[in-house]
Amino acid sequence: MHGHEWDATAADSAPDGDTARPEGHRLVPLATVLLQSDGLILHWSEDAEALVGYTAEEAVGSYAAQLLTDGTDRPEVLGVFQRIVAGTGWSGVFPVRHRDGHRVELEFRTYPIAGPAKTLLVLATASDVRALHAIEADMAVLDGIFDRSPIGMAVYDTDLRFIRLNEALARMNGVPVAGHLGRRISAVLPGINSAEIEQIMRQVLKTGKPVVDARSHGRVPGDPKRDQAWSASYFRLEDSTGKVFGVCSSIIDVTERSQAEARAARAQERLATIAEATARIGTTLDLQRTAEELIEAVVPRFADFATVDLLEPVLRGAEPTPIPADRSVTLRAVAVGENYETGLAHAVDTVGDTSEYSPDRSYTQCLRSGRPLLRAHVDEEALRGLVASEDRVAPGIAAGIHSYMMVPISARGMVLGGSEFIRMRNPEPFTDADVALAEELVARTALALDNARLYRRERETALTLQRSLLPQEIHRTLGLEIAYRYLPSSVVSEVGGDWFDVVPLSCGRVALVVGDVMGHGIRAAATMGQLRTVARTLATLDMPPEQVLTRLDETASGIGEGQFATCICAVYDPLERTVQIASAGHLPPVWVGTDGAPRTIEVPPGVPLGVGGVAFESIEVPLPEGGTLALYTDGLVERRGQDLDDGIDLLARTLAEPGRTLEESCDAVLGALVTDGTEDDIAMIMGRVLPLPADRIATLPLTGGGRVPGKARRFTRATLEGWGLSALSDYAELLVSELVTNALLHAEAPRRLRLFRDRVLTLEVSDAGGATPQLRPFAEQDEGGRGMFLVSELAQRWGSRVTRDGKVVWAELELPFGAS
């Protein structure tokens, strides 16, 4: 026989029929000794050595009474042993002598047994009394904790079946203790998340790692109509050798705390939604994009489906008006969003579609009152009162609509439209807290939408003003093909002050003007209109470009503080094939010659218009036939993050590509430089020098003194007959005679007569004088002074301009109908 240890974690048999229950991890040595009938020791276990100190070698073969007692106790020991041998047995507590001399209180149990050849032997077991008392005290404490604890406690076997639980847990579950034993959680409590709980317990069994605050939730038999929540901790039960007996749990009801946490989580979610929406909604001044931002903020976090519909006047930028009680209302879908393929396509409008709601509809009444509409639980009857038409009820029910909310979009006391929120897969109905959140989000959206509406109206006004101030028609110019492009900014919030103009001048000349008012909006557009009008007027007065810019600078300074603009003015003379250019802080023109080599024309830069007090300079540049000139604003070549010179170089290279018409060159330039929209307006004029037809111009050098007027008249008549314009000969001869005579009398000498046929017939006399002719009053008896008066009366238009070596006086006659 061999000694063994009694493991305090082994289970007792419970008298009430309960299955075994763990008793802790304390180990108590249990000594076993086998004796002959005369007290001779035959077997001595290891636990016996542990209790009294004698080894088996020392004990076996010795008499127990002599080994374990002193003289005073020996008679009593021998008397007890005799009763045992007699077959009566004995158990009790008796002190024995330890090998080192001290006494040890042991509890004995003895059993007479039959040995070989029917000899009588005695089997004795002994335990330390103090260790047993400690175990009993521990068990009393554990039982007290288990049975009297206010929190639920349970022990499960390795198959996760209940083997013990306390009354607190039984009350918590609403099931008696007996109803738990031998059953798993899933069988006892089918209304909670048992699969998740058992998975946690299996993990604890497998790894031995405790789990703290594992949450479970659901409904229990004791309270089947109320959702509850619990917090449980699990740890594995095992002995010192690692043998696993099961899992123990402690459970507390945290329903109130869980509900508070859920409320806090929902509040936090609402705050997060508001914070995200605040950052997302209203990033642009575009109505549709703002509506889409609201949809993106609420789907899928808040609703499975959402729409934004606006009143038609709002989309036009007009002021919304109150909705009369007897009027239906028409709205257009601006944004629609869904969390998944909801199937609501037949129950709501797609973007761009309109719906009309009759006065008795809940939607209409909600818009009229300005208060939100909540239908926490939607059935077929409720949905019928919400949709615009009966045919939308069935698709809505089929899609699973179960909760609905509509919030009017109101800003500055006026209703702009409505936003709908729908839940289908989200099982939670909308609540009053959801209404408050939706109102907050819609209010932010409404303000952004109204700002977008106001800006759209302002932008449309500015664009209308801007377009009305730009040239509506570009007249054909002899000797110069002209093409142009104007692109408003692609940024919805920007309306610029860029402009261009092509101004026909006398003698076939043309002024090309491009300008850019700094800033944006209606004020910039209005300033642009003023400057363009002044520039056009000044150019028609035959002022040279530098004088035009000087007068424009004065005009800009007088408009108001901070109104600045850049401008470039180029006057092309097709007869001389030259261009005079002056710049007020503008980008340089680009010229591509007949050799295909592009270059920028270096014009004295000047300062922007509006600075004031700075003189402007002009240069004269020859433009050979076949070359191309480009004037433009900075919106064409300026891009964020790129050098301005890079844009100008790309413009020049694109213009230099051969084989294109002028219109194709314009398109190529825009295609190369405007790839993804522009943040500024773009204005661009291109001019290509064309050969001048010989039958459009005639020139006569004026030499010969007093005979010059007659010579000029004959030349004029002969030229007009050749051009088929004999009907104008009389007027033309008289005008030429007066102009030449005036030059003879008031200038040093006339130099040249030139006839030019374009949209009108131009008669031009150049001389070396510097004084411009004037209309002067005269009396009937005066012999002179009537020449320029006759010119003014006969000509459709007349004037003069200063040249490098004198001046030119010209007069124009309308061509007969059908002549060109």
Image (cartoon, rainbow, N blue to C red):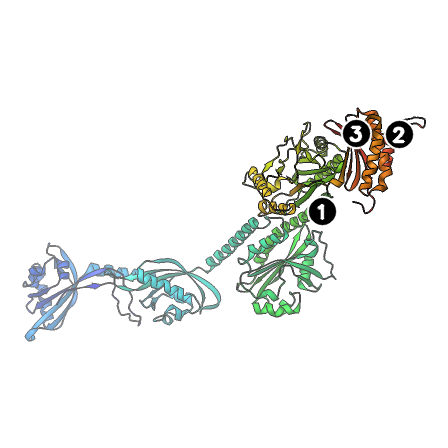
Q: Nearer the viewer, residue 206 or 749?
A: 749
From the image, tell me which residue sits under label 1.
464
- Badge 1: few (under 14), some or many (20 or more) residues near its Cα, within 10 Å? few
- First of labels 1, 3 by sequence position: 1
- Residue 182 lies, in percent from the top left, at 34, 71
| Viewport quadrant of the C terminus | top right
Contact (Cβ within 8 Å) of mark 3 with mark 2: no
Q: Is residue 15 left or right of residue 543?
A: left
From the image, tell me which residue sits under label 3.
702
From the image, tell me which residue sits under label 2.
786
| Viewport quadrant of the N terminus | bottom left
Q: Specify the quadrant of the image occupied by residue 474.
A: top right
Residue at disc 1, secondary structure: helix
Contact (Cβ within 8 Å) of mark 2 with mark 1: no
- Residue 486 lies, in percent from the top left, at 66, 45
Q: CA distance from mark 1 to mark 3?
A: 52 Å
Residue at disc 3, secondary structure: loop
Q: Specify the quadrant of the image occupied by residue 415.
A: bottom right
